[in-house]
Amino acid sequence: MRKLLTVFCAFLCCASALAQALPSAEDILQANMPSTLKAQWHRVQHSEMLTDKLESDGFVYLAKPDRLRWECVSPVKNLTVFNGETPSGSFRLPQAKDFRANVLNYGDGYTVILVPLRRDLKQLFMQVTLDVEVGTLRIKSALIKSRNGDWSQIEFKNVQTDIALDDNLFDKDA
């Protein structure tokens, strides 16, 4: 009995130490907000209305404080650019305070579960699950679930940060 109690106490101590070592959602957010970013992405989308999953590939470019280029190159070319202007309606880019966040350790990385608190974000999706690297705290992939059962899995690769980016990338008319 004493051995079992000792093992149980050791387990509780280890679990407590692991919980304290987990990074906060703010730490992870800061690690993923470099001054500039360029990455390739691959997206798999599932819709309850379709039998096959849809796959697409592209690039994302980010420049602080408020410039974003999301470029789909296959199977259909599509471009979305935000360069400091407020998108249509009253939409604003999400911030950390707009989510309830839970950080979990899953072995060789962390999982961050984000649940939207803002009404407009709740209408867009139910939950975002991020897979994060332990050493860098960089996001490797994101799983976005909607209320109707649809989901999108986006994987990022060839991520480059704090590099020079051409200003023309963020010109909607270029």
Image (cartoon, helix red, strand yellow):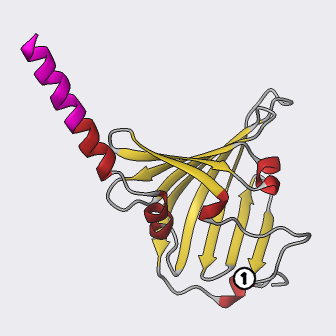
User: Please, which residue is most extreme toward the right here?
Assistant: 89
Which residue lies most toward the bottom here? 167
Q: Give the magenta-colored segment's residue range.
A: 1-13
> Taken as a whole, is the magenta stretch helix, strand or loop?
helix
| Rendered residue at 63%/67% (across/down) | 60
> Hey, what amino acid is under mark 1?
Phe
- Residue 65 painted magenta: no
Q: Nearer the viewer, residue 146 or 169?
A: 146
Identify the residue at horizontal 44%, vertical 52% (top origin): 132
Total numbered badges shown on the rendered structure: 1
Residue 125 in the image, given as x and y percentages of width and height: 75, 46
**Position of 174 compared to 103: left or right?**
right
* Nearer to me, 33 or 24: 24
Rate crowding at label 1 as few (under 14), some (14 to 19) or many (20 or more) other CA atoms within 10 Å.
many
| x and y, in percent, of residue 20 in the image | 31, 50
Using the rendered image of the protein, determine whether residue 45 is visible from the camera's viewpoint.
no
- Tell me residue 107's x, y (percent): 33, 39
Which of the 4 quarters of the picture holds residue 98? bottom right
